[in-house]
Amino acid sequence: KALSLVLALLMLAALMSVPAFAEETMPVALNETGVTLNIPYSYLNTSGYVSVSDGSELAPGVDMYCTEVNYLAMPYDAVEELDPNSEEDMQRYFNSMASLFVIFSLGPGKTVGDLCSYLDSAYGQEGVIDTSRLTQIAEVDGYTFYLYQDPLYQDTSGFPDPEYEAEYEELLSRTDEILELSDFSRPTDHFENMTGSGLDFVTTDLDGNMISSKDLFAQHEVTLLNVWASWCGPCQDE
């Protein structure tokens, strides 16, 4: 009996010493903002759609960046079917959206005051963000990262079903978990390693005619390429 008890205790100790398997995550590297979100698959396996912005500098040269994670109270397929030129579809889109969190990345010497001044100027109004809801979460290579969550942008009154509201609240409660899994680094420009290099391509224009970069660039000393998408309503207007 004594031997059996010892063996049982040894087996229990062995089981307790085995580390729990961490949930598998999907890394979403947003190099331009210096944020890499390592998101658990259970966070993405939802009825609604979790949208992670590409992340970008607020404006060229300001050295302040923004990463947004939003929740849409509709399946991904439904989001894909929305017509950007339809006022009704766009209203449905914005009604079904609520912010999960925003991460601001501020460069060396940049302050919260600089961020507020820029946003107020860009939006033409004061108090665009509530500074009391900014929480510093990391500092790397002189860059400071702030979490921003504001009830003003967490309105679920436009959600079509209570199921989505419950799911959104569950995701919202996991923000700290996501941040603990995330990595932060100095933001890098997508094109900084391409500066001074040439582009070489062959494609067709909207009428199906073949065009090459060689012929296109030969027409001018400097050529500006405006990259846009055929499905983008504002791009079409432009």
Image (tube, helix red, strand yellow):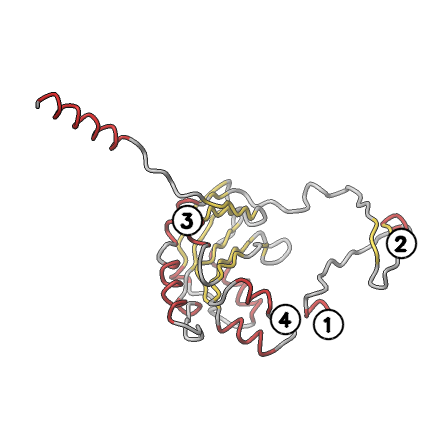
Image quarter in which the C terminus is found: bottom right
Q: Quadrant of residue 54?
A: bottom right
How far, Cα to Cα, is label 3 from label 4? 32 Å
Earlier in the chain: of badge 3 and badge 1, it is 3
Q: Earlier in the sequence, mark 3 or mark 2?
A: 3
Residue in the picture at 60% in, 44% down? 188
State if disc 2 and disc 1 touch (CB < 8 Å).
no
Mark 4 or mark 2, earlier in chain: 4
How far apart are labels 3 and 1 at the CA level?
A: 39 Å
The answer to whether residue 114 is seen in the rendering is no
Q: In this view, does 163 lie above or below 179?
A: below
**Considering the numbered disc 3 on the image, is that residue within a helix, a strand or a loop?**
helix
Residue labelled with disc 3: 179
Amino acid beneath label 3: Leu
Residue appearing at x 44%, y 72% in the figure: 159
| SS class, disc 1 | helix
Q: Name the residue under label 2.
A: 220
Whether pointer 3 and pointer 1 mark residues with C-beta atoms closer than 8 Å, the reply is: no
| Image position of 22 (left or right of 33) | left
Identify which residue, 74 or 102, lies in the foreground: 74
User: Quadrant location of the N terminus?
Assistant: top left
> Measured from the top left, where is residue 233 in percent x and y?
68, 70
Residue 123 in percent (x, y) is at 56, 70
Disc 4 element? loop
**N-term mark: 3 or 4:** 4
Residue 64 in percent (x, y) is at: 55, 54
The amino acid pointed to by label 4 is: Pro
> Label 1, on which residue?
237
Residue 206 drawn above or below residue 103: below
